[in-house]
Structure formats: structure tokens, C-alpha cells
Image (cartoon, rainbow, N blue to C red):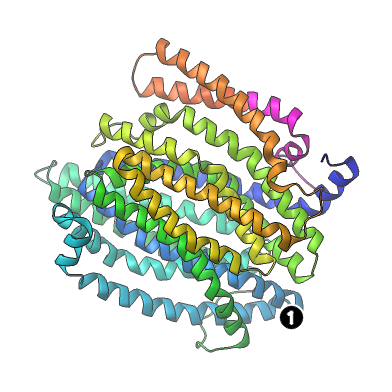
Amino acid sequence: MAIEAPKVERTTSVHGGFLRSARTVSVLTLLSRVLGMLRDAATAYVLGAGVVNDALTWAWTIPNAFRRLFGEGALSSAFLPVLTRELQQNGREGARRVANEVVSTFGVFLIGLAALLVLAAGFVPDGALVWAFGDDKLVKMQLALGYVQFLLPYLVVVCLIAQFMAVLHALDEFGVPAFSPVILNTVWLAGIGLAAWWGHWGSPDTASEALRVTQGFFVVGAILVASVAQFAWHLRPMAKLGVGFRFVRPRRSPEVRRVAALMGPMLLGLGAAQINIVADRSIAIASLPDGGTTHLYYGLRLMQFPLGMVSVALATAVYPSLARMAATHDRHGLAATTSLALRTNLLIALPAAAGLAVLASPIVRLLFLGGQFGEPSALLTERALVGYTLGVPFAGSVMLLTRASYAAGDVRLPVRIGVVMVFVNIGLDLLLVGPLQELGLALATSITSLLTAAWLLYGLRARLELSPDERLLVGGLPALLPAAVMALVVVGLDAALATLLPAGRLAMGARVAAGVGAGALVFAFVAARTCPVEWHEVAALWKRRR
């Protein structure tokens, strides 16, 4: 059903405010993603795709999984509604007290968890590694566990940082948290620069595996330094907003107990997603030749570029709004805002996914080809990227629908779906990795995202009590047309340039620039005419608002 003009104006004015916050997050996320691509390109150039980079990638997965689980995932998702309610009832002084209690109490828990994991990683028997990954992968997994032990302190600091972000989000401050990943990527780049310097000047054998191992530890050290810098970055803005952090003695206050109670089901639901990531990379190490885990990681990183620019920015900005509407029992506002966010996400995510798939070859070669990263690795990374891009719209929809479910008070639905999807994902991994290798594992992730989004949407419709004019996913179907037209134009243009331009990095850059530019123009022209409501909101992100 078409939305009438008065309805559009009301939805835009009342529920579109989060999109202005999404603009801020998107701009800073763009800076972070660009630096992240430079960081990954530099890491690939220095370390290549082999034993060391596979081990480092797997090791980085472990603290990152806990960060997304305890930091940006269950803890933040449980903490934000409690903090928002306290802010409404008792002001910033009450919010400061609750924030300090929650961060201090869970900080002590995280320190104990990290210490236990460091000890556990040091006592994993070689026989268990051989049983799980094969005799030929023993050295790689021993190195990976060594990297894990050094990276686990990052788990504690970055989870606390995520709670600082939640506090600032509750106060509608999005710029400071969104800049935090820029710090990580900048320091990481400095670390890989030092690793390259050490390889050139500090080692007599620049081709030795021992040198690569040492260079991997340079990256690990840079990550730890970056976490301390990110922690310090949030302290002054929080103090200026009246919610400055001070460590207090951990105690089971009513607010801490409420956060813990909300976390339980969320840990199960979000834990399922993190199990999928660890399972994917573990199956890759066990089933693929050396370099396979690295190819998957770089393909996923490229897929996450539009995901971070669009879906993560929207989900980050919309969740505080959804939490406030749930706190005031504004059921209609909750449904309308979810619908607007989901349709806006699809309008941008669909052409972004199509563009990535079409330009996969020049993008991968522009960013990664060179140094220790050769043509075979570029081809396999390209295959992984194509598989991942198919899931971009669905992964973004899962983020938004999960937060809408949490805001609506239903934490069980994502849990049930997540647990089932763990088995679906692992089954698809094992089914597809043999015949399709990297492409198969990437496709398994995309198919799982599609099934998860469909199930969440079905389960959430009744919970949100949607009216007939709130179309959710069906309302995003018109976005298929501008995405398809854009893809056809970019395919033809890139094919022509591939025959006209000589091989080389400069030619790859020209193909990417021409494809992105032409695709953006075509998409804007068609989307403004086929999806006027959603296009108005997208365009509003980049206009100066009073």
C-alpha cells in the first residue's frame, strides 16, 4: 500500500531524527573504514596470505568475538535501556551513578574472564589441536594461541569502551564513539609500518617465517596500545556531559541486577552469531590450504565496508530512539521507526552489495595485490567477497530487527533464532567448503543471514503490532530496481574499461573510481523516482539541518 503524503511528513518529522545521528556515525565510519582498508592492505602487503596471517586472523577473532558479545552486543544492549530509564527518572547524576556501578562491576568480571582464558590458551594440549585441525595445522594453531594470549587484555579494555559508547549514545552524543575505531586503525597502521621497517632493516633474512612471526607480534602490540588510547579518548567527553567515569567498588545494585537479567537471554542470541564467526574461521583453517582464512577475512572486511557505513550506522543511531519509545510505551512510534530504518537500509544496502560484487576483481587487486600478497590470493579473496556481498542487505536487516526486538521487550525471539542458525551455518559450512572452498564458506554466511532476517521479520510483526501501512521488508522491494539498473550500467562500463586499460594498479583504481561514480549517479537518478519516501530520508542525511 502506498503511503499518503501526510503520513510521510509525520513519520519523517517525528521518527526521522535518528537519521541525522546516523549521518554523523556514517561520516566518521567512512573515515574509519577507509583507514581500515589501508590497514588491511598494508598488513596483506607485509604478511601476505599464509601461516602467520592465518594465525593472526584467527587470534584476532577470539577477543573480537567477546567484544561484540560483552561489549557492543549483550552488555551494551542490556545496559542502554536501563541507563535510558535512569536518565529519564533521575537525570544525569543518576545516570552517572548507574554507569559507574555497571562498568566497574562488569569490568572486574571481564578481568577475571580474560585471566582464565589466558591460562586456558597456554594449556591446550597439542593432541587436541591435531584432533581439531589436523597434524599439518599444528604449528599454525600453536602460533595462533600465542597471539591470543597477548590479545586477550584487549578484550577487557574494549568491552569497557563499548559501555562508555552506550553512555554517550544515551545522551545523543554519537561523534566521539564513532571516532574511536579511527584510533585503532591509525595505531594499527603505525604498528604494521614498524613491522615493515623491522623486516627491511632489523632482520638478516627478509623471507624467513620467523620474521613474519615477529612482525605479527608488532601488530598485536599495536592493538593493545590502541585500546588504551581508545579508553582515554572517551573519558573527557563523558566528564563534560556530567557522566564522568570513576571506578567504584563492585556491588549488586538493582540496576546491575537488571542489566545482568537482561544480558542472559541476549548472550545466548548474540553468542550464536559469534560462534558462527569462530566456527567459520576454524573450519577454514582446518579445511583450506594456507592463506584460506586470510582470504575469507579480507573478503569479509570488504563486505563490512558498506555494512558499517549503512546498517551499523543506522542500528547505532536508531537503538536509543527505540529504547526511549519503548520506555514511554509508544508502540506506534516503535513500529514506524523500525519500518523507516529497515526500508532506508535496504535502499542503500542493495546497490552497495551489487556494486561490490560487480567490482570485486578491481577492488581486491587495487587494495591487496602486491608484496607478499600474490595473484592467486587476490583471486581467492575475490571469490570470498562475491559470496559475502549477497548477504549485505540481510545482515543489515538482522541488526535492525534484533535491536527492534530488544527495544520491544522480546529478547527470546533473537535467542531462539540465533541458536538454530548456529547449526544451520555450521551445516552449510561443512556442505559447501569442499566443492566451493572460500566461496562456499562465504555463501554459507550469506544464506544464514537471509534465513535469520526472514525469521526475525516474521516473528517481529506480531510483537510490534504493525498496521497495514507499515510495510517493513515489502516496502523495500522497490529498491531492487535502482540496484539492478545500477549493476547493469557498472557491468558494461567495467567490461569496456577492462579491455581498454592496461593491467596495473592505476588501471584498477580507474575502474573502481569510474564504476563507483557512474553507479552512484545512476542509482541516485532511479532511486529518487522509484523510492521517493526513502530517498528523501537518505538525502536528508547529507543536508545541513537546523
The image shows residue 301, relative to residue 516, as above or below, that is below
Over which residues does the magenta segment extend?
521-545
> Magenta: predominant secondary structure element?
helix
Q: Write the residue at 48% across / 27% down.
A: 358
Q: Write the residue at 41% across / 26% down.
A: 362
Which amino acid type is marked by label 1? Asn
Mark 1 element type = helix
Q: Is residue 437 visible?
A: yes
- In the visual, does 408 lie left or right of 112? right
Q: Which residue is mark 1?
A: 90
- In the visual, does 353 lie left or right of 11? left
Question: Residue 85, position in %: x, y?
Answer: 71, 75
As rendered, which of 276 and 436 lies closer to the eye?
Answer: 436
Question: Residue 25, position in %: x, y?
Answer: 60, 50
As rendered, which of 22 and 419 lies closer to the eye?
Answer: 419
Disc 1 crowd, CA 10 A, few/some/many (<14, 14-19, 20+): few
As rendered, which of 23 and 8 lies closer to the eye?
Answer: 8
Question: Residue 249, position in %: x, y?
Answer: 50, 88
Which image quarter is the N terminus in?
top right
| Residue 335: quadrant of the picture | bottom right
| Name of the residue lying farthest toward the left | 204
The image shows residue 473, relative to residue 105, as above or below, that is above
Residue 496 among magenta residues: no
As rendered, which of 36 and 333 lies closer to the eye?
Answer: 333
Residue 539 among magenta residues: yes
Q: Write the residue at 59% across / 75% down.
A: 262
- In the visual, does 237 lie left or right of 409? left
Question: Residue 156, position in %: x, y?
Answer: 41, 71
